[in-house]
Image: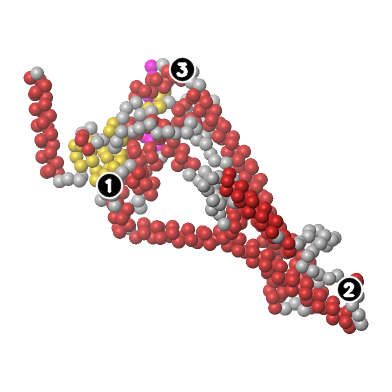
Amino acid sequence: MNPNPEIMKVVENLNYRVTLGDVVAQAGLDFQVAEQGLLALATDAGGHLQVSESGEIAYLFPNNFRGVLRNKFWGLRLREWWEKVWRILFYIIRISFGILLILSVIIIMVAIAVIVISINLSNERNDSGEGGNNSCDKMVFMPRFGFNPYWFWWFDWGYYDQPYRYQIKKQRQIDKYSSPGKENEMNFLEAIFSFLFGDGNPNYNLEEQRWQAIATVIKNNKGAVVAEQIAPYLDDLGKGYALEYEEYILPVLTRFNGRPEVSPHGQIVYHFPDLQKTSKEWYFQPVSAYLREKPWRFSDANSGQIMLSIGLGTVNFVGALVLGSLLENDIVIENIRGFIAFVEVIYPVLLAYGISFLVLPLIRYFWVQWRNSKVEERNQQRQNKALTLNQANNLLNRKIEYAKEFAKETIISNQNLAYTTEKNLIEQEAEQTDKIDAEWERTLNQSDT
């Protein structure tokens, strides 16, 4: 069984000594998964079991347990190696879209220039053969395309002139000062990927956050809660009888090995004995009043980078249309060869890329807006549950008070151990004998007085 990375992280965070309840609370794992993972990790990493006098178990791990695992498991080594390789590969994939855009623009512009020069030279030869140069009757192609019935858009080589660069620089300075101490970490090639595909799900670990928050709430209340304290972290609470009988709490009971307790007034509270066990004293941990999903962002690139991406995409698209029109010219068809022949072959790809570069972000923009409306709706529902808890009526307050009767904390310290795998059994028995004799002596002294 491969070591669980989440359990390993919790072990390190808690100074290499944990209980099952600690792992569940910190990682938000299912009890069975956490228990199996802890046992497997202790077996593979040379960990030790410490059993208290009351029968509770703590797990002690060596500080270099990751090194022990790395030497023992080739799979773990391979996974760590692949994570490093994947970071490089993914970075190459991200910047490749920007490189393709720039290459596409260069190919299109060079092809247009070659075709324009070829047509102009052909026209000059024809004019010379006719005995003169009547430039008024001929269309002369220049690097500047003005608005006319054929092009609809205009292109100017001065698009990237100094004033435009100044605007981009000014915008970056605004972004810098609006977030002091944080430079723009995304280069332009990465910004193009962000413009096309976004930057991933901001709530990729939402379930992990949900269960960590629930476990923290339970631990903060020393293992005993009411359903209303958990509701702000759950979705789909149900309606009618399902909501009235608090069926939404069942997954929490299953995951954290809880049990319902009924008050004399018929109210139900929930008791989690395993979360009441800890390797050291639990201090109140701050937790949000409700689970809040982050809104999706269209792109993490700054406004200057987005505008530049749109500009290049537009240039690429318009250039592809212009190139397609030029490739239909009879002179080009008659003299097509070399580089232009290659461009004609890949032209469908250039046009498709130019269209998708502008259409895909547009579709994604509306999708992000729709997605955020759903996120905000769920956040509002959870917030309403938190407000209900904060404005608790007498019935709910009485329910919370009854839950406190089951609240307690069991600390498994090194002083109350009955058994540990760190030491030889005979040595431990000798220590326990001395401990028992000392306890008897103290008891006798108390009875004499």
| Disc marking residue 217 | none
Q: CA distance from mark 1 to mark 2?
A: 88 Å
Tell me the quarter of the image containing the C terminus. Answer: top left
| Mark 3 lies on residue | 395
Local SS, label 2: helix
Res 277 seen here: no
Question: What residue do we see at 53% from left, 31% from top?
Answer: 382
The residue carrying pointer 2 sits among few (fewer than 14), some (14 to 19) or many (20 or more) residues within 10 Å by Cα, namely few
Question: What residue do we see at 34% from left, 37% from top?
Answer: 21
The answer to if 259 sits in the magenta stretch is yes
**Sequence-wise, which precedes: disc 1 or disc 3?**
1
The residue carrying pointer 3 sits among few (fewer than 14), some (14 to 19) or many (20 or more) residues within 10 Å by Cα, namely few
Local SS, label 1: loop
Q: Is residue 313 left or right of residue 31?
A: right
Q: Position of residue 120 (x, y in %)?
A: 81, 75
Is 4 drawn above or below residue 287 in the view shown? below
Question: As shown in the figure, which amino acid type bears the numbered disc 1?
Answer: Phe
The residue carrying pointer 1 sits among few (fewer than 14), some (14 to 19) or many (20 or more) residues within 10 Å by Cα, namely many
**Sequence-wise, which precedes: disc 3 or disc 2?**
2
| Mark 1 lies on residue | 61
Q: Position of residue 324 (x, y in %)?
A: 76, 66
Q: Which residues are magenta?
A: 255-264
Is 45 drawn above or below residue 348 in the view shown? above
Q: Image quadrant of residue 272?
A: top left
Question: What residue do we see at 66% from left, 55% from top?
Answer: 166
| Mark 2 lies on residue | 135
Question: As shown in the figure, which amino acid type bears the numbered disc 2?
Answer: Ser
Res 366 seen here: yes
Q: Image quadrant of residue 49?
A: top left
Q: Is residue 26 left or right of residue 190?
A: left
Foreground: disc 3 or disc 2: 2
The answer to if 431 sits in the magenta stretch is no
